[in-house]
Every structure is written in structure tokens, then in C-alpha cells.
Amino acid sequence: MVHHHRYNLLKKGGDEEAGTLVFLYYRRRRPNLLSVLFLSLLSCTFILAPHLFSASSYLSHLCSFGVQNEGFVGNIDVNAPLCSSIPNGRICCDRSHFRSDICFMKGDVRTHSPSSSVFLYSSKSNNGFISYVSSMIDDGEPEEHDELQHEKIKPYTRKWETSIMDTIDELDLISKRANLGVHYPCNVIHNVPAVIFSTGGYTGNLYHEFNDGIMPLYITSQHFNKKVVFFILDYRNWWVMKYGDIISHLSDDPVIDFVGDNRTHCFTEAIIGLRIHDELTVDSSLMRSNESIVDFRNLLDRAYWPRIRGLIQEEEQETVDKKMSRSPTSGSVFDHQARKPKLVILSRNGSRAIMNENSLVKTSEEMGFQVQVLRPERTTELAKIYRSLNSSDVMIGVHGAAMTHFLFMKPGSVLIQVIPLGTEWAAETYYGDPARKLGLKYIGYKIMGRESSLFDEYDKDDPVLRNPSSFTKKGWNTQRRSILRIKL
């Protein structure tokens, strides 16, 4: 049986103290019972708007630097403490973190996609690579007695989740003696390091795409100043297209499909796997130049603004064309009005939706807000979403993966997260705390049992209403079936 929480979000009578946030349950047999004077809080917030929305105290500039002559592996003294310095011809793997493994290879590094392997040869010629000399035995297989080291790695950042890691492709990292030459001649020689990672796992969920992929990629590669090439396992073309604007600001080279490209690619240095710090964050204490989540957002700004400028120009031209066609002699083609504070409502369909969304929009507009209802789809261009939220003063939404879009808001803006029953820890850990680190003014509203449609579907003493945390402890699937099926 499918159960839904239903909530109403409305302006309540004037007897409430300014600055409070109230959500009251609305039932059909009591149609006059109103809910939520949250907008009064927002109005109070905007009294301090010149101070609150000034981003200058939060923003900092990216400190970029090139790769040092002795190679990036030899210079990683904070980000990879267990592999801070390794000689040529060695593999060093840091498996100390519970979230991910990461390995470093330095020397003559060569990919071999048919065997899902990356080889490292211990000797180097003057140009950094060994000449190809056949060392095949009679049965056509390479000899194994010259193997020095063999590591295995699944380059995905959810190492503790066995079930999802079982779906990730594994790579063999093999160090071999090169006294007899190498088995695979270089088809492509790169003069920049390689970073190899997976876009499998939970890819397809916005939160995981940023938390497990994009942000770890930034943490791992940003210090190369774009002088790096990315190889992807579990390659998905749509992912490359979706995040192409960001990728192009981390690497000057096109992304390579590790499995789909059978050529042997050669490097002098490679990282396999990605660093991850915490949920949707960048820990400045672990970055070599103290970069933070604000610096990551600055990268997003640089990535999306070229496209946003193009969208603005297109819209301005459309406005000019329409007004000129209606009234060529009417004067100015643009209307200049005082800017209203902008409220973006992150709308959902199905579960965890705001059921009285139209009333919320109307009430907000009456209070002086410019309101935009944003309904992101998987195919929605990220630059368009970024534009909407980058220009917003407030965003309100219900806990879920779409709240990841808070990364698109300017530091100093207000984020309101509606927190369903039993999700307090997840809401705070995944979105609340990271939002504060970004410099947002975060407000979390925890709903009560009577504010849910489950109040009509369960007895008031049922654990679903009285002790929702007990379902949280039983795991995600149980929680999703009983508590997260809601409407606001």
C-alpha cells in the first residue's frame, strides 16, 4: 500500500510573532485551518539584506599552480600523506580512508583496456618511455616472472558500500621489470598526468553525481591547473555531456573512455581513484592551497557563466524583436523596475511535493517576492538551473537529491529545507552542514506527525508517527516505504 504525507504551506493569521516558522496540518474536513508563516521570517531576513547577501566576506580566489618539475606524486604532502613521495617505477596505494582507495603510479605508465590493466615499467629511456621489444612466450601470453607489484582497485568513492562496489569495474595495476622490453607499444603519448575514475555506481542521482564524482574530481585534480587528462570507467556519454562545462575547467584534454578506447595510452604519472573529504564539501585543511567549497562554487561560476551570457543575449534579442514589432516608436524597449527579492521554490512531483504550491506562490508574491517555481528534470541544462539559483535570494525545497542545487546559490543567500519525518540526520549531514560551509543562511524545518497525510492513514500512536527514527534505523528501503512517501 502506498502512503503519502500531505502538507499545506500557507500564510497564517497575524497573531504569530514575526520571525517564526510554522507548518500546520491541513485536513479536508477543516478547510479553514491555515499553515506556515515562514514568509514573515524571510521578510525579517531581508531587512538585513545589505549585510546578509553580501558575498564578499565569503568568497576567495582560487590559487592555481602548475605541476612541479619533479612530478605531482612527489609533491603531494597533504592530500596523499601515505604516498607523498615515491620513486619512478613504483605503485603506491592509499587505502586508509573508509570512503575510497587511491593509487599513484610514476614512471613508464601504459593503459591496456582489453585486460582492464594499467602497467608500470621500472626503467625509463631518455624520453621517459621504454622501446617496445617483444617478450611473448610461445603460447602468446606475456611472461609473468618480471612482475614486481600487483594492486587492484575499484576507482569509486563509496568503498564501504559492498553492494554498489560490486557493480564497479576493477582495474589491475601491475608493475613489471622492463629488462626485456614491454609488451604494449605506445599508441598515444601524453605529456600530462592521467586521472582514472568511475562514473558508475549511483550516477544518475544528482546528489551522488556531485558528491561521489564531480567534487572528488575537483579535489583530486584542480591543482594540475587543467594540465591533466581524465579516463573514465563505466563511461556514460550523457554524463560527459551534462558535466562538460565543469570538466572543461578542470582539464584541457577531452575525456577518454577507458574501456571503449583500445589504444595504449602512455604517461609518466597517473592517479587511479579520487579523493573525497565529506558530504558535498571540500576540506580546506586537506587541500594544498587551502581551497574550500567556496572555491569549488567559484569554479561552477566560471563554468556556467559563458552559457548564461548567451542565454541572456538570446532573451534580450527576443524582447527587442517583440517590442519593436508591436510598437516601433514606443521608446525604450526595456522596462526598468526595482528588483524584488527572488524566491525559488524547488518543486517536486509525486512524493515529497508541496500540495498547495499555487497558494504558496500567490502568498509569496503578495509579500513582495519575485517567485520562480523550478522543476528540474534529468535533461534540464545545468546552466539554466544555475542561472535561476545564482540570481535567487531564497530557495525552499523538501529534503531529497534535488537539494544538491544549493551549490548553485550565492554565499549569503537563504536555504530553507523542509525535513520529513525520520530524516533529520540525513538532512543535516547531506545538506544543512554543507550549506553553512558554503556561507548560506540555512534554516531546517522539521515537520511533525500531525502535519503529514500519514496522520490520516496511521493511528496517532503508530511508530510511523510517534517514533519515525525507528524506521530510519531499519535502513533506507524500510524508511522509503513508510516515511518518505509524503507530500507537503
Image (cartoon, helix red, strand yellow):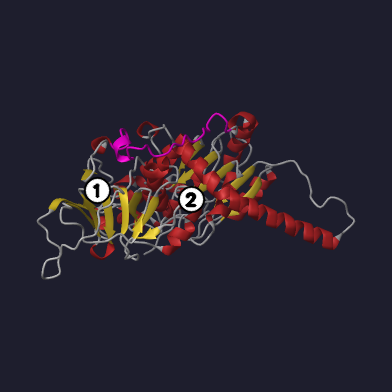
- Residue 471 higher or lower than 52, as above or below: below
Decide whether residue 460 is among the magenta residues: no
Residue farthest along the right direction in this orientation:
329
Find the magenta span and give its range: 55-80
Q: Earlier in the sequence, mark 1 or mark 2?
A: 1
Kindly indicate whether the residue at mark 2 contacts the one at mark 1 (C-beta within 8 angstroms): no
Label 1 neighbourhood size at 10 Å, few (<14), some (14-19), many (20+)?
some
Residue at the disc numbered 1: 124
Left or right? Give the position of 367 relative to 119.
right
Left or right? Give the position of 6 relative to 54.
left
Name the quadrant of the N terminus: bottom left
Q: Image point 35% across, 50% down: which residue?
A: 194
Between disc 1 and disc 2, the foreground one is: 1
Kind of residue sitting beneath label 2: Ile
Q: Quadrant of residue 137?
A: bottom left
Spatial CA distance of label 1 from label 2 is 35 Å
Residue at the disc numbered 2: 246
